[in-house]
Image: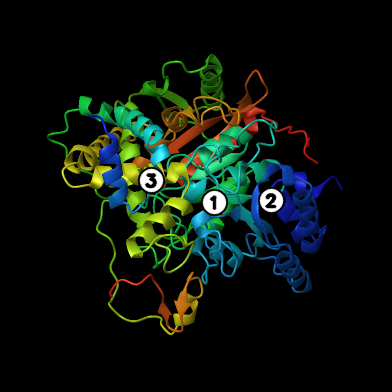
Amino acid sequence: MSLDKEKIKHVAKLARISVDEAKVDSLTKDLNSIFKFIEQLNELNTDKVEPLTSILNRSLRSRKDEINDGKIREKILKNSPKKNEEFFVVPKVVE
Amino acid sequence: MSNITNQSLSEILESINSKKISSLELTQAYIKNIENAKKLNAFVTTTFDQALENAKKFDNKPNNDQLLSGIPLAVKDLFCTENVKTTAGSNILNNFVPSYESTVTKNLWNNGAFLLGKLNCDEFAMGSSNETSFFGNVINPVGDHLVPGGSSGGSSSALAADLTPATIGTDTGGSIRQPASFTGTVGLKPTYGLCSRWGIVAFASSLDQAGPMTKTVNDCSIMLEAMSGFDEKDSTSINKKKESYSKNLKDNIKGLKIGIPKEYRVDNMPKEIDELWEKGKKILKDLGAQLIDISLPHTKYALPTYYIVAPAEASSNLARYDGVRYGYRSQKGKDLIEMYENTRSEGFGDEVKRRILIGTYVLSSGYYDAYYLKAQKVRQLIKKDFDDSFTKVDAILTPSTPSSAFKIGEKTNDPVSMYLNDIFTVPVNLAGLPALSLPAGLDKQGYPLGLQLIGKALDEQKILNIGYAFEKNCGYKNEIKKWWS
């Protein structure tokens, strides 16, 4: 299959990445050549194959649902591009 | 005394432990080298003051019972380091200063080492040439027009140029082994789960694994021993007894069975790579190993599988860069959604955006089964190929890369040709296995070439032993002229 510009703009919207109109053509070309490469997989019949979901052959370890840290608000806020006392600040979302 | 920085980590450790040199003298020698090697662009950040202080601290109260007593180390800028900027080679993390230390680096420091600086890499470890870094290309010390490989290109360049006695990288599809091969150094991708992923900037979580990059196999075993180990904070960390890889290093490989997979002889492979492989086989045979022809029939599907699985996981992992909690934020946009879109568009480079788009597409409604599920099934077949082979052999020998280091700019316009660089390294990540790249020879132009030893899961000791025996009998000499200083 081939990806057209509209499809790519839609995917970019889903990924929350704005795409420069001037770059859409070259992006379309690159992505199509990558998908052509990827689609070699269609040569293989995988009807009877179980998908590999974990390489470790066992389920993931879980831990007890207990608080083991905390009181690190300052550390968490330290790298925020915009903050107000105890909060992250984002552009207004409600009027 | 000859220049200490030319020596291997194990030789340097001997000098430190026998007090022939102080940690401070050692650190000063590396700092001098780094200051003279700015042209290589291997470092994103240096931590000289902190390193000098740590060296003095060690000299005042030396503890020589550690694996890395008094050793300064530079590490890939993908490992979070407490209070030291960590960028992952990206504009979006250009101002990120972690408040915590990655488990792997903490393990190194607990073994007596200390930080010398952070090494350049491809943006979010996505690349095979270090050309996708926001902080510019890294130059291969082998030649001023050559890439050092990627994504751990700053690591391979710094190591080969004597700017750090050893280093660590991460390997998602070959990012330790390919740069090691391009610079004539040793690189190990451990078994998935052997080294903790906690505190490493995530790329593709089911494939990412940290590992050592060193000048010798012995150094590699020391570093692996220091950095590996169970970590509760990584849910995929393997809980097993710690091994003494360096103490158990042996060069007797008599009777071991080495598999030679026919599928690794690819079309258009340079004759030199084939000859190198033949040379490797002969060395191992002469040492008493038995060569066995094997087949890994799904090898050719490994790269297409990887280019679904890795971007899918990346698109999910990189969703966290939203310009709100940390990292870069765009000042453009009239609402929250536009702020996200502009932040991510300005913050990520072209290759990262490409991969996020591929990943978003293959996971999107209506395409998931055709791409992602298909790739998971083929991944199963690739793993099964290895499982079947390892009932017959102890290890597998292949070339590390299909070519030597290429020129800067040579492959940047064609993503697929860039991806093909990882053709021999990617299958190992998909199967979660350990693999060691060893310097094995030079091509006609005098550029290094590497061979790869693949082992069973958690069989690092065996491939290190084979590598150790190989190294002693290969006669490879890294003679890089210091043209940059």
Whether callout 2 and callout 3 share a subunit is answered no
Report the colour scheme.
rainbow
Label 1: element kind = loop
Determine which residue is flagged by label 1. B89
Determine which residue is flagged by label 3. A19
Chain assignment, label 2: B
Residue at x-position 40% and y-position 36%: B426
**In the rendered structure, which amino acid carries the disc numbered 1?**
Gly
Query: Which image quarter: residue B25?
Result: bottom right
Query: Which image quarter: residue B370?
Result: top left
For the C terminus of chain B, the image quarter is top right
Report x, y in % for residue A52. Answer: 24, 45
Mark 1 against mark 2, which lies toward the viewer? 1
Q: Is residue B421 left or right of residue B295?
A: right
Q: Which mark is residue B164?
A: 2
Badge 3: residue crowd in 10 Å (few <14, some 14–19, many ≥20): some
**In the rendered structure, which amino acid carries the disc numbered 2?**
Thr
Q: Which mark is residue B123?
A: none
Q: Is residue B388 above or below residue A50?
A: above
Report x, y in % for residue B208. Answer: 42, 50
Residue at x-position 41% and y-position 44%: A20
Chain assignment, label 3: A
Badge 1: residue crowd in 10 Å (few <14, some 14–19, many ≥20): many
Q: Is residue B114 left or right of residue A18?
A: right
